[in-house]
Image (tube, rainbow, N blue to C red):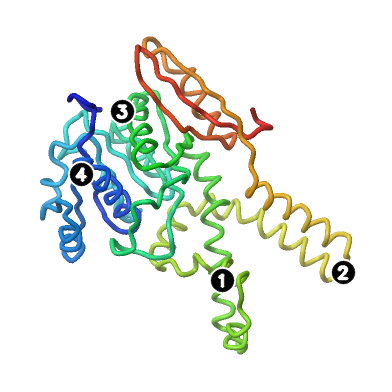
Amino acid sequence: MVDRPGDIPRVAVVGTGLIGGSVLLRLHGRGIDVTGWDPDVDTRVQGRARSVPFPEELADAVRGRDVVFLCGPLSSLPETLLTVSKLTGPDCVVTDVGSTKGRIAGFAAAHGLTDRFVPGHPMAGTERAGLTAAVPDLFDGAAWVLCPTAEGIERFRGLAALIIDVLGARIVPMAPDAHDAAAALASHIPHLLAGSLAGAVAGSDLRDAALGLAAGSFRDVTRVAGTPATRTADMLLSNRDQVLAQLGRVTGFLDQLAAALRAEDTTALVGHYRRARGLRLALLDRELRAAPQGFALAGGVDDELAYLLSLGSAGGYLTTCVVADGRVTYTGHLPTAAA
């Protein structure tokens, strides 16, 4: 990824809202040579006020960089990927932070960029937006999905090490389609549910009375409804097929709850909620065990790729990626049952 003593990459962040701004501030705070760029003039001014280089032109921001993070809106990513790939050298690694991976991965493959583009998605954020909402520690301990390919495995290794060592995240390697299916349940449908509850209350004659009684449960359930509406719509539409497919699981379970309630079936109602509570407890108290693995750099990458994708699909993640002495060594962690 780099060809200089110390292997410290030069990085650019294109799009410096909440996610991109947080990447930028963390890298800058760690002494990484990083430039920012944003199409918004005021945002560029804000960035310079934080002593971060913010050139006026995109070309000046990405020229000579070893890694470029694309952090703009989902709808803008394909065009930005093409533009940045033309403005940077063939050894520059490009990644994104979009919340869906299938479309952008397919676009990259169709344009011959699989060897240098590594699709990514940090599972972190808040309902706030903009560079003023960015915080350097946003990714500490967070899951960060990267989609490795055989053609781009070397770029994946370097990028994974940077994200782990500098941004503080744990890497979840996944195939793009597997990511989109899981993200629909874990991230996208919660936005539908939050919007449904908040929207229903907003249109109710009991709106003010409900707000007067609202406590922690209402605030928790509706938190992501505070996300900027255009960002939410962009996310849902980009993963429309998977969101609608996985939504059937949610509405099916909701129908079972409603049926038990109508029938005054306490046994069924308790059983359904025990199942739901079990999942909630599993989320809060997941037990994982180390599953380290090493691979020789010489030869094929099929076994390495299979290890990475199986780790992510089983709910695991990486906490180290080290390339040395002709080998790449990963420290993977798997849920106890899978391990």
Element class at badge 4: strand
- Amino acid type at circle 2 is Ala
Q: Answer with mark 1 or mark 3, whichever residue precedes in sequence.
A: 3
Q: Nearer the viewer, mark 1 or mark 3?
A: 1
Q: Residue furthest top?
A: 299
Q: Contact (CB < 8 A) between labels 1 and 3? A: no
The Cα–Cα distance between marks 4 and 3, rounded to whole angstroms, is: 23 Å
The Cα–Cα distance between marks 1 and 3, rounded to whole angstroms, is: 44 Å
- Where residue 267 appears, as percent x and y from the top left, is 89, 60
Q: Which residue is mark 4?
A: 34
Q: Nearer the viewer, mark 2 or mark 1?
A: 1
Element class at badge 1: helix
Q: Which residue is mark 1?
A: 219
- Where residue 80 appears, as percent x and y from the top left, is 24, 48
Q: Which residue is mark 2?
A: 263
Q: In the visual, does 174 lie left or right of 46?
A: right
| Residue 265: quarter of image | bottom right
Q: Residue at x 58, y 83 (%)?
A: 211
- Amino acid type at circle 1 is Arg
| Front residue of 296 and 285 | 285
Q: Dot 4, how many residues are within 10 Å of its Cα: few (below 14), some (14-19), or many (20+)?
A: many
Q: Nearer the viewer, mark 4 or mark 3?
A: 4
Q: Quadrant of the N terminus?
A: top left
Q: Which residue is mark 3?
A: 115
Q: In the visual, does 126 lie left or right of 61?
A: right
The Cα–Cα distance between marks 2 and 3, rounded to whole angstroms, is: 57 Å
Q: Answer with mark 4 or mark 3, whichever residue precedes in sequence.
A: 4
Q: Nearer the viewer, mark 2 or mark 4?
A: 4
Element class at badge 2: loop
